[in-house]
Image (spheres, rainbow, N blue to C red):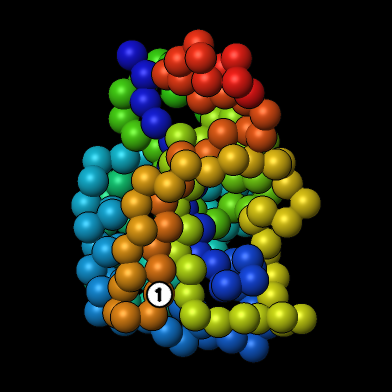
């Protein structure tokens, strides 16, 4: 029994997950992006959060109206936190884990067959990428350069990665969804034959 972990990241072209003074989606949400989000969260999966992003999302789903927010409420959620109340975390269908996230995700990947998806949670996802636990890195790249206003960079200062392109889709004629299989730089992915191993 095993499963996959996807890290899901909304990004400006210069690699930031948000920016001071810019609206959600950098003001560039379109119908195809919404449709993609609906399709993404219709799949059976467990959502994985760090505590800060968990608190933000649990507020978003009550304050704003997106077509996929009901589905976020329904899906099972894991949040890594030493401060949230396990009996009343503040969002339905949530399990609070007060343990090392890298060790826990490594264990869960080997003991469950339900896919996991982590969105936001920069420090958590950076640690999971550095540990080689991420099977898919999905980057929704919006047509914006946030410059000095940029915040929450996922990949700046993190692990060195080689990325195999799995999928590339243009949404609403301007936003690019890039799906990669990441590998720690210098590691040889599973399935690579002996000849290529020797050449490297």
Q: Residue at x 34, y 52 (%)?
A: 167
Q: Residue 183: horizontal and vertical position, in percent? A: 57, 34
Q: Is residue 193 above or below residue 119?
A: above
Residue at (60, 14) in percent of width and height = 198
Q: Nearer the viewer, residue 136 or 200?
A: 200
Residue at image coords 65%, 81%: 146
Tally of numbered tags = 1
Mark 1 lies on residue: 175
Looking at the picture, tell me which residue is in the foreground, 20 or 28: 28
The quadrant of the picture occupied by the C terminus is: top right
Task: Find the residue positioned furthest to the top.
Answer: 194
The quadrant of the rendering that contains the N terminus is top left
**Element class at badge 1:** strand
Mark yes or no: residue 95 visible.
Answer: no
The residue lying toward the viewer, choosing from 19 and 85, is 19
User: In x, y percent, where is residue 111?
Assistant: 40, 16
For label 1, the crowd category at 10 Å Cα-Cα, with few meaning under 14, some 14 to 19 and many 20 or more, is: many
Quarter residue 60 falls in: bottom left
């Amino acid at each position: 029994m095993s499963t996959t972990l996807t890290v899901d990241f909304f990004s400006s072209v210069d690699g930031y997950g948000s920016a001071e003074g810019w609206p959600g989606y950098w003001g560039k949400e379109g119908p195809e992006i919404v449709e993609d989000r609906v399709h993404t969260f219709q799949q059976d999966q467990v959502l994985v959060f760090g505590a800060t992003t968990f608190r933000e999302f649990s507020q978003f789903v009550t304050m704003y109206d997106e077509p996929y927010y009901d589905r976020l409420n329904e899906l099972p959620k894991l949040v890594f936190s030493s401060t949230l109340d396990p009996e009343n975390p503040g969002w339905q269908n949530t399990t609070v884990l007060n343990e090392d996230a890298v060790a826990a995700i490594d264990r869960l990947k080997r003991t469950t067959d339900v896919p996991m998806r982590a969105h936001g949670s920069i420090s958590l996802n950076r640690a999971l990428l550095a540990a080689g636990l991420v099977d898919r890195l999905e980057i929704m790249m919006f047509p914006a350069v946030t410059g000095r206003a940029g915040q929450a960079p996922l990949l700046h200062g993190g692990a060195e990665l080689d990325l195999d392109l799995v999928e590339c889709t243009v949404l609403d004629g301007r936003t690019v969804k890039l799906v990669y299989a990441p590998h720690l730089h210098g590691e040889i992915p599973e399935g690579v034959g002996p000849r290529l191993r020797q050449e490297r």
